Amino acid sequence: MGANPTATSGAEVLELEDSMDLKSIGVLLRAGASPALGTIMNIMLRKHINQNFFKTWKEEMSYILGYIVADGCITISKERKNRPFSLNITSVNKEHLYKIRKALDSNHKISKKSGSGPNTIGYQLQIRNPVLTNDLINLRILPRKTYNLDPIKVPEKYFPDFVRGFFDGDGTVYIYNVNKVPQIKASFISSRLPFINSFNQELCRNLGIPIKMVHRDLPKRKHQKLIRYYTDFYIDDCEKLANFMYKNDPTLYLHRKRQVFDKWKIIKRRHYIKQNYPSKIGLQLNQKIA
């Protein structure tokens, strides 16, 4: 069964029913001795979290869920049988993790970790709370998410926030030139084809545009075996995407990505005539899979 906590003023009363690891629920004992089973004792909370955060659909909840789809995971610890799951959220932007931690009403430590590329530093927020992780699992954020991510049904009202969270984790946007004419391109990428297919269809429907093609991104290095899938948005569709993600003036977003969209708004393009570029079309036809 595990421990049975009851809230009191400034502390909690904990009845220890089995040999659980007290650190896993983030507590600090008033006395240094390890208690016997069945002991009723007062504890002081060392770590805090709004464990009901993912029970109700809200703007911040939907954003962080989308961000976890991209840059988060549920891990399993075999040594902690009573509380085996933990939530890990990573980012190269430490300040962004602080914003996410604040939204979760958490005081968990943000630690430094090695980034995915050479000479890069990343940061990690790790939370071990059974209520929070069970709610995420019920929302289809499963362990080994890279191979187990299926479509997630998000209420339409909060879909823009979910899209923005996923974009900030696994999306890109940049401005470039073709024949000295400025262009803008935004992309979403995922290792799970069923998820990106469903996500792409729902997003295009909300933007009121034809469904985009999903393309396969083959590993570029010999040691990389994971195939990823992506979908691209250009020019007008990219502008619709930005309006969709930021229309409610949200508080949670990556500044550097929104800044690209803001820069695009002020670029003068009166001489631009929309056209297709055969070389790009040929490349996409070769990679098209869905």
Image: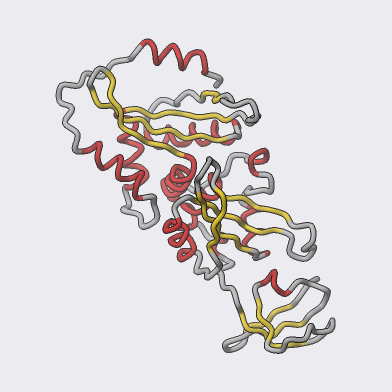
In screen coordinates, is 270 left or right of 95? left
Instruction: Please name the residue shown 60% across and 55% down the image.
Output: 88
Here the colouring is: secondary structure
Q: Which residue is outermost to the front?
A: 119
Give the camera-side residue of 256 and 185. 256
From what the image shows, is residue 98 above or below residue 70? below
Residue 248, image x and y in percent? Answer: 32, 52
Q: Image quadrant for the C terminus?
A: top right
From what the image shows, is residue 104 above or below residue 221? below
Give the camera-side residue of 98 and 251. 98
Within the image, what quadrant is residue 87 found in? Answer: bottom right
From what the image shows, is residue 278 above or below residue 84? above
Instruction: Please name the residue shown 23% across and 22% down the image.
Output: 181
Residue 10, image x and y in percent? Answer: 57, 87
Give the number of marks.
0
Within the image, what quadrant is residue 153 found in? Answer: top right
Instruction: Please name the residue shown 76% across and 82% down the image.
Output: 15
Instruction: Please name the residue shown 63% across and 30% down the image.
Output: 224
Residue 106, image x and y in percent? Answer: 52, 68
Residue 194, image x and y in percent? Answer: 60, 32
Q: Image quadrant for the N terminus?
A: bottom right
In screen coordinates, is 182 left or right of 119? left
